Image (cartoon, rainbow, N blue to C red):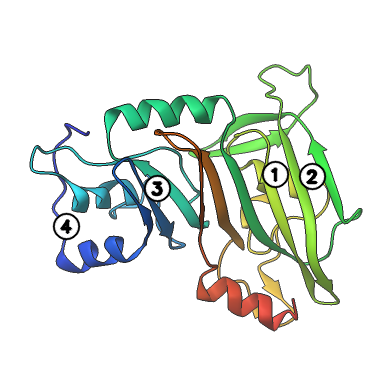
């Protein structure tokens, strides 16, 4: 699919990206992205997941293309299209909000109420070289309607684990919405999350894309799930959740 210049990959990189595949057919390929890997771009001079897709290039020089993105420190399910028609179909489905994304997040304290929908418009702002999202009034210049749903799965004296579902697709949406209700994600330094817990430091932003359901280009709905990586599972267990 891509006509860009190929990226030279090491055998270790090729083996790694192939090991992350959790679903593949003639039209799509889904990965369980590890934390610390950028989806695309970024200022860090290291290969991104987009670069690593050259491991799947065909003899005609075309390769899969990412359909959406995850933040660098967010782990979990991410989808790529293997053909141009599939990319077009999935891009339109994403715009029409026909993707259903479910995440797991660790919090320092359980939210109240235990489950709710957050309806808070967001606006993108630039501070230096960094981009942030901020909750603003619905009629503020640049405001974008944004809704997220959360549900508490387990809670204890040391923290909570919640299931999050973005109903819109704004940058950092889940992170900002949870911070807005006073429950920022553990490890989310950008939006006020705790960097330490009662059982030790947070290894990263504690957000995992656990499940993705999407309309498949040949019909029906496909659901792909990714198990939480070791760092997430270990901290969850240590917090008694």
The residue furthest front is 219
Circle 1/circle 2 CB separation < 8 Å: yes
Label 1, on which residue? 176
Q: Which residue is drawn at 65% across and 33% down?
A: 168
Q: Could you say where residue 111 lies in the image, as x and y percent from the top left?
A: 85, 57
Alpha carbon of mark 4 to alpha carbon of mark 2: how far? 41 Å
- State the residue in front, 226 or 70: 226
Label 2, on which residue? 180
The reply, left or right, for residue 175 in relation to residue 159 is left
Q: Upstream in the sequence, badge 4 or badge 3?
A: 4
What is the secondary structure assignment of the residue under circle 3?
A: loop
The reply, left or right, for residue 64 in relation to residue 216 is left
Foreground tag (4 vs 2): 4
Foreground tag (3 vs 1): 3
The reply, left or right, for residue 85 in relation to residue 182 is left
Alpha carbon of mark 2 to alpha carbon of mark 3: how far? 26 Å
Label 3, on which residue? 39
Q: Residue at x 35, y 31 (%)?
A: 87
Q: Upstream in the sequence, badge 4 or badge 2?
A: 4
- Residue 9's label in the rendered image is 4
Foreground tag (4 vs 1): 4
* Badge 1 density bin: few <14, some 14–19, many ≥20, Cα 10 Å: many
Circle 4/circle 3 CB separation < 8 Å: no
Alpha carbon of mark 3 to alpha carbon of mark 1: how far? 20 Å
Alpha carbon of mark 1 to alpha carbon of mark 2: how far? 6 Å
Q: Residue at x 77, y 50 (%)?
A: 150
Q: Quadrant of residue 194?
A: bottom right
């Amino acid at each position: 699919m891509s006509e860009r210049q190929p990226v030279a990959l090491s055998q270790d990189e090729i083996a790694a990206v192939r090991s992350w595949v959790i679903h593949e057919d003639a039209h799509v390929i889904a990965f369980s992205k590890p934390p610390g890997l950028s989806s695309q771009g970024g200022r860090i001079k290291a290969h991104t997941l987009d670069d690593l897709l050259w491991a799947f290039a065909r003899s005609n020089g075309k390769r899969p293309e990412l359909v959406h993105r995850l933040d660098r420190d967010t782990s979990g399910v991410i989808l790529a299209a293997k053909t141009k028609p599939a990319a077009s179909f999935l891009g339109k489905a994403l715009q029409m909000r026909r993707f259903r994304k479910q995440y797991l997040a660790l919090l320092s304290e359980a939210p109240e109420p235990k489950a709710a929908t957050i309806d808070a418009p967001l606006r993108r702002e630039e501070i230096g070289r960094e981009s942030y999202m901020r909750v603003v009034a619905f009629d503020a210049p640049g405001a974008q309607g944004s809704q997220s749903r959360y549900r508490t799965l387990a809670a204890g004296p040391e923290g909570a684990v919640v299931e999050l579902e973005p109903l819109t697709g704004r940058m950092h949406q889940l992170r900002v919405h949870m911070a807005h209700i006073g429950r920022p994600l553990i490890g989310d330094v950008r939006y006020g999350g705790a960097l330490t817990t009662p059982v030790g430091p947070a290894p990263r932003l504690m957000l995992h894309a656990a499940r993705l359901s999407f309309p498949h280009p040949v019909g029906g709905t496909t659901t792909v799930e990714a198990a939480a990586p070791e760092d997430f599972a270990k901290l969850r267990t240590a917090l008694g959740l």
